[in-house]
Image (cartoon, grey):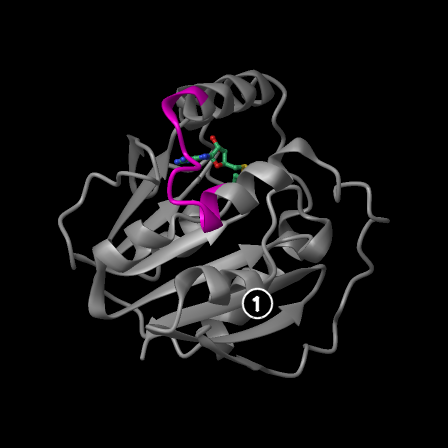
Amino acid sequence: MDAELKYLEPTEDIVARDGGMNADHPMRKVTHQVAFDRGGWTSERAAKVVKLFDEMAQTWKDKDFDSRSMPLLDALKRGGIVPGGVGIELGCGTGAYSSLLSNQFDSLLCIDISFEMLVRSTSDKGFRIRGDGAMLPVAPGSVDGLFCVNTLLFPDEVDRILTRGGYLVWVSTSGNQTPIYLSPADVSTALGSAFAGVSSESGPGTWSVFRRR
Ligand SMILES: C[S@@+](CC[C@H](N)C(=O)[O-])C[C@H]1O[C@@H](n2cnc3c(N)ncnc32)[C@H](O)[C@@H]1O
């Protein structure tokens, strides 16, 4: 049985997305396999993803922050999130959202598998850690909020690290045109029946918040 997923009305400021150019992006297949196939994240695949993002980091630009942060801000506003505790920003990249998220938590860990992305961080908020979302360097049941903005989903780790009342926030800043993308329904299916979620759209993107039932 899938997780329960409730859709809220989109906000009134929906921004047109680019025209489907990312649907065949190579990271799409990886994203799907990692979320649905427990054996999908191999050391070879991890090495390829590190190489890809280490290379992309050389020219990475955090763009259109104001519009791209709209789904994240809407998730914080309407996703029933209570600030405080320990948070993880997984796949933080160069830290476009780290300052915003650091205001949400007593402690924020900004984790990325790419060293080259981390060293180009434009934010000094949170503890920046090189790590893999498939094996997060935290104890079971120790994280109140896990934020995944345009990055991969590792369902077993979500289940392992979250506290009883913890939550996952899944944001795709360009909605279904985001290169690393899972629909809210796919995230719901990947997490399974132990979780229930709420989802909506804002600006150019989509967001979902999932909690244990
Ligand atoms: C598309 S970028 C998004 C960066 C940032 N969240 C943003 O939206 O600007 C995806 C990021 O996820 C990181 N990433 C990919 N796989 C990861 C993994 N297994 N563990 C941690 N980070 C990972 C990449 O290195 C990259 O920095």
Q: Does the stretch in magenta take in 66?
A: no
* Quarter containing the C terminus: bottom left
Q: Quadrant of residue 128?
A: top left
Give the amino acid at mark 1. Ala
Q: Residue 40: within the magenta?
A: yes
In front of the other: 84 or 192: 192
The residue furthest left is: 139
Foreground pick, 45 / 210: 45
Residue that appears at 61% across and 35% down: 27
User: Which residue is pictured at 76% across the width and 68% down the height?
Assistant: 14
Residues shaded magenta: 34-44
Give percent across and percent down for residue 201: 65, 70
- Please give the residue where the numbered disc 1 appears in the rendered image: 185
SS type, badge 1? helix
Given residues 138 and 92, the one toward you in this image is 138
Quadrant for the N terminus in the image: bottom left
